Each structure stands twice: as C-alpha cells, then as structure tokens.
Amino acid sequence: MDNMVDKAFQELLDCYLASNHRKKVDIITKAFNFARQAHAGVKRLSGEPYIMHPISVAMIACKEMGLGSTSICAALLHDVVEDTDYTVEDLENLFGKKIAQIVDGLTKISGGIFGDKASAQAENFKKLLLTMSDDIRVILLKICDRLHNMRTLASQPANKQYKIAGETLYIYAPLANRLGLNKIKTELENLSFKYEHPEEYERIKSQLAETEASRQTLFEEFTSPIVAVLKEMGVKYQLKARIKSPYSIWHKMQTKHVTFDQIYDILAVRIIFHPKNHEEEVNECFNIYVAISKLYKSHPDRLRDWLSHPKANGYQALHVTLMSHLGQWVEVQIRSDRMDDLAEQGFAAHWRYKDESGELLNEQQAKPVETIEEDTELNKWLLTIKEILDDPQPDAMDFLDAIKLNLFASEIFVFTPKGEIKTMPANCTALDFAFSIHTFLGSHCIGAKVNHKLVPLSHKLQSGDQVEILTSNSQHVKESWISFVSTAKARNKIQGILRREKRELQKRGEHMLSEFLHNQGFEISTVVVEKLCTLHQKENHEELLVDIGRGDIVLGEQEAKAVVQDNVRPQSSGKSWKSYIPFLGKKKTTISRKADYLIVDKDFNRKKPVYVTDQNISQFIFPKCCHAIPGDDALGFIDRNNHIVIHKRNCSIANKLKASYGNRILDIKWDMHQQHTFTATITLRGIDRVGMVHDVVDIVSDKMNINITKVLFTVSDDNLFEGTIDLRVHDRNDLKAIIKELNGIEGLQEVRQKV
C-alpha cells in the first residue's frame, strides 16, 4: 500500500515539475506528508488508502487544469479539516493564509446542518457559488474532487450512484462547461450517463465502435483536399477528428426523437493552427474558412462566428458546416492553438501561465502578456451569481432552477436603442430584457419595439435584435409573466413582487375573516380555516386567505354554515400552511391516496435496492410527470409522508430531486411478470393516406393483441398527420415491440413514446 501511495505522489511531483509553474516542491511535499499522516489508517469504499483520493484530486488539478502549487497543496489537504481534528487555523500556521482559505472554502461546501425542510445539497451549492467570488480556485478544485468521485463511483451503492450522478449532470457538468472546462464537462456527462442508464450507454458505445471504420474513411477523404490547401497557404496546423460523446448522442436522440443512424454530426473536424501573428489570428481563421469553402459547399444557416463575440466561458472559434463528396454534412471548427487551449481548459488555462504572484506569463515564462477578455466575462458571471443569492428562493428546487435558467444558458447579443450591446441568455423574452436593465422598467413594461416593430412582452429575442422597452405607470406585475420569462433575474424580481403583494392580500384576508367570524360568534382557528378550505376546495390556508383578501371569496351565509357543520372533515394534520414544503406538495400528481402505501421508517435500509413486484406495486406512488412502467430505468424518492414515489431516472422532476434531495433517493428494481397493465402513450407523425388509421389499429389491436383506450389523429392542410394512441401494456418490452412493428407501416415517419 505504501509503495502505491509513494508512486502516485511521485507521479504528481513529476507532472508539476514538467509545468511552467515555479518549482515549490518543498511545500507540496510538506502538504502530502501532513495529509498522509492525518488520514493514516483510513480507507475508501474501494479499499484503497484514503490519501489516494487527495493525491488523485491534486493530479487532476495539476495535469488537467494546469493549476500551481497553491492549488495542489489545497487539493492534498482538502479533506483534512472535515475528516480529522485539525482546524483551518492549524493549516494557516503551517501552510499560510491562502491555502488555508481555499481549504476552508472547500470544507464549507461539504459541511453544514440543515432543517428537515431544507435541501443540504442546494445549500451546499449556494456556499459553493459564494466562495467563487473569493477565489475561483475553490470551484475549480471542487470540480476536480467531483471528477475523481465520478471516476470511482463503482464502489458506491446504486442509490448513492443515482444521487451523485444526477447532481453531477444537473449542476457540475454545466458548471464545468460554463467555466470552459470542455474535456472535464464531457467526461462528467459520460460518467453520469454510464451509471444512470448503463444499457443505453453500452449500446451507444457499441454502435460507435461498429461505425468507426466508416467515420475514419469519411475523415480521410474529407480532409485530404483540406491538407493540400493548408500546405499551399503555408499554415502550421494539426487536424483532429472530434467524435460526439455517448451522452451527447443519447441526449440528442431523446430531445430530437431520432435514432443513432439519424444523427449526422457524430464526426466533426477541427483545424488547429499556429498563427503567424497572434494579433491577426482572427483574420487567419477567416482566411482558412474562405479557402476550404472553395473545396466544399457550405451550409448557409450553419456558420457560427464565436470569434467576434466569444461565448461567456471564453470559447472562440469559427464553425462552418460543409457538404462532403460522400453526401454528408461535416462540421469544421477552425481555431488557433491559443483558442484550442482555452476551449479545452477554459478559465483554468490562465493558471497554467501565472506565477504565484498572479502575473500572467507566456509559455516560455518570458515577458508578461495581457489578460484577455474572459476574465471580464468571469467577473460578469460572478456578479450574476451574487444577484441570484441576494434574492434567495424559498425552496431549493426554485433556487436550482434559477441557476439553470441563467448561468448555464447559451447567449445571444441584443442591442439597446442607443446601440449598446447586451449579452442575454438564448430564448429570453422582451420582458427578460426589460428586467435586465432595471426592475422598474420590467415591472411596468407593457410591450416592446423589436427592430422598430411592436411586439408583446412574451416575444422571444434573437441575436442582433434592437429592443426598445415600452412602459406605463398603470401596469402591474402579473403572475402569468412567470410562465414565459427565462432569466433568473426576471423570475426572481417577479416572484419577489408577487410574494410581497400576496403577503399584503393574506394579511387583509386574515383580518376580514377574523372580523366575519367574530360577528358569527367564533374565533379564528386552524380547525375553522380548514373547514373553509374544504368548502372552497383550497389546498392550504394561504390560498384561502389570499382569495378572501383579493375579493374572490365573499364571506357570507354558506361560510357561516360550514363553520358550524359537524360533518365537514376535521383538520387532517397539525401542520399549518406555513409548514407546507414548496414543490414537493404543491400539486397532487400521484394516484389515489386511498392505497395502503409502504412507509419508510428509520430502520429502512436505503442502500439496498427496492424491488417492485406484482404483489407490492400498489404500495408505491407513480406520478404523472413521467409514467414509469416496468422495464424503465427508474429510481425511488422518499416523499415528505415517507412514501416511495417512483420516477424514470431521466425525468426532469427526478433530475431536480437527485440534485437537491439526494439522501432520499432509492434504487428501484423491477420484478414483474406481466400480471398488471400500465397506460402508455405513443405519438405518430407521417404522411396521411387512405387506410393509415386502419393499418395502425390493426397492428396494435389485432396483431399485437394490445388494448387501445384512446385514439386521436389530426391531419393538416399539407396532408401531414399527427396522432396519439393510449395503450395498456405490461412493460417496456411491449412498448418497444409495438414501436418496431409500427415503424414498418408505409408513410409513418416517426413513432415514439410520449414522455
């Protein structure tokens, strides 16, 4: 074991010594020896000494992010404060203030005590974002830590795998992408995919292996003329084949509803050149584009210029899609070696060229070079984070939505009436733009002029639009606005204003109800309000009081009768609306609560899989959001009533639950023997003809002997049809067999299960 540890540390030192950083071997060795002694005798679940984890995290920081001695020491020490008796003060005395601060930041992310209603994961993520403004290396090292945990995830039980993989896919992979860590982002996505959907992962890997030879042929034939042109131009270059990752392929198959064979951008070609003059590298990109576009016809709508306006994570390149002589579209990415370095390592690439004083150096450690625009973009991003944290959401799920909506969106460029450029997330609306300028402008917005044409608040903006916001003092914030805004800032401001208005209405409603009850000889109480909630079919007290305050409910004779009736159901719980957990209980989306559901008690073993059988299936809740059926990759979630809710693993709701309430996730296994049937919906699209519906129904009902409960077909003016069929199936295999048979019908273009 000692030999393994010594060898791993020596590899770390060798990697560090090969970098451009100043050689502070002594402090790294001191940090290693200290961490080794602190973690002595402790092992990971995999059986290896615990110190191997900090060494591996430090290796990722050094080799894959290019970070220096301060980061390497912090990586080696990152678990010492959390897992041993040593304090941050001890580390500061031994290793200095900066290393201690980074370790403290990493420790704060992992620690903390939260109430039953709080999501520890979401709270930790808030802490993670807060520490970024102090030192970006905290988040970089946290990503290194997460990457090594994902690489060693096999040793964890399945429920932990789903929790960690879901959290990684929902938070850390997009975060890595936003920081420009492309290689790490891709690996995090693939590892998450591997553990959440192992069969799909292996199938796509197998399909990639089977089609490798044809892709190689396409690459060689396509690049041969390009090589000749680049040599003629005297360009120093290298060509790389970029293969789409298994996760990206699967994600596209899910979102675009296509098969593996229908994905045509699996292969892309990268031209990475060494510019003759760094100041002219953008022009050289366009020169290469002009030269190769003479060889192949380019797609008019697929030119992406990330040179003039880099992505928010600093990414720069020119993307063009060309038609190969084999009849396939091939994307070509043109970028300089500096741009390529930034594309692979993002903001972290700067640390490769910085000495410990923070001065940015070039590769030969010669004269200082200027820091580039990405630092400014990073500061903008950190400012956005602070805005979100300044107005915290009342629920963990809303907070994560705000992060996802704002930080991880792609960008468009919009102009003000005076010609100033503003970066906005893609799919943003005119109302988002109004709130981005000022809260007053957003809250009083009645419309906008986009490119001098009048448009509604919900109008989606495109890159290059010029936007003028129109306001009126009589305009007020409406609840319906939340349904179409897409930025965190707009949503936070709207919800904040609505919450204030709701509190005022609730207070007014409580006063009106109290007066009404007093006149009837009653005092306001939980039981009385509960009876009125039942009368007006309100889910909680807050809803009732707001409607009374707004005037939607007028208190009168029927309310007086309801209060004195004995046959109205008593209060079902001692909890008032204030203890109501947002998101987890807002909508009753589950099947009838009359069933005898399984109760998860304190002795329940959450690490073991829960088997769903023909005998116990009625003890579980199946929500309408994803319609999980036997054979689906599924997980269980322990709700606030300690019942088990079963979701598909790729359900959007389940993704949020994994990222926020991971300690309540269970591994679900199916042990069903076709004794029950389940509702599933198939959607169909194609070209209409006489007998189309007959052929579809004939296959499903007669040939497959499947019960159809509902059929709906609509035909457009251009003879295209869309249809849905509700079926009763035993499991996922039934559904696959039906879809396979239907795909053989003439004129059917697309058959898929409705999510």
Image (spheres, helix red, strand yellow):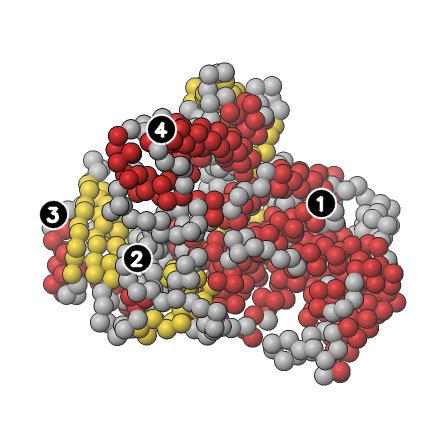
In the rendered image, the quadrant that contains the N terminus is bottom right
Count neighbours of disc 4 (C-alpha within 10 A) and say few if under 14, some if 14 to 19, many if 20 or more.
Answer: few
Residue 648 x, y percent position in the rendering: 39, 60
Label 4 amino acid?
Asn
Q: Earlier in the sequence, mark 4 or mark 2?
A: 4
Name the residue that disc number 1 marks.
133
Residue 592 x, y percent position in the rendering: 28, 56
Q: Quadrant of residue 81?
A: bottom right
Label 3 amino acid?
Val
Q: CA distance from mark 3 to mark 1?
A: 65 Å
Q: Quadrant of residue 730?
A: bottom left
Count neighbours of disc 2 (C-alpha within 10 A) and say few if under 14, some if 14 to 19, many if 20 or more.
Answer: few
Name the residue that disc number 3 marks.
690
Camera-nearest label, 2 or 1: 2
User: Which mark identifies residue 593?
Assistant: 2
Q: Earlier in the sequence, mark 3 or mark 1?
A: 1
Camera-nearest label, 4 or 3: 4
Residue at image coords 72%, 55%: 105
Element type where label 4 sits in the image = helix
Q: Earlier in the sequence, mark 2 or mark 1?
A: 1
Name the residue that disc number 4 marks.
519
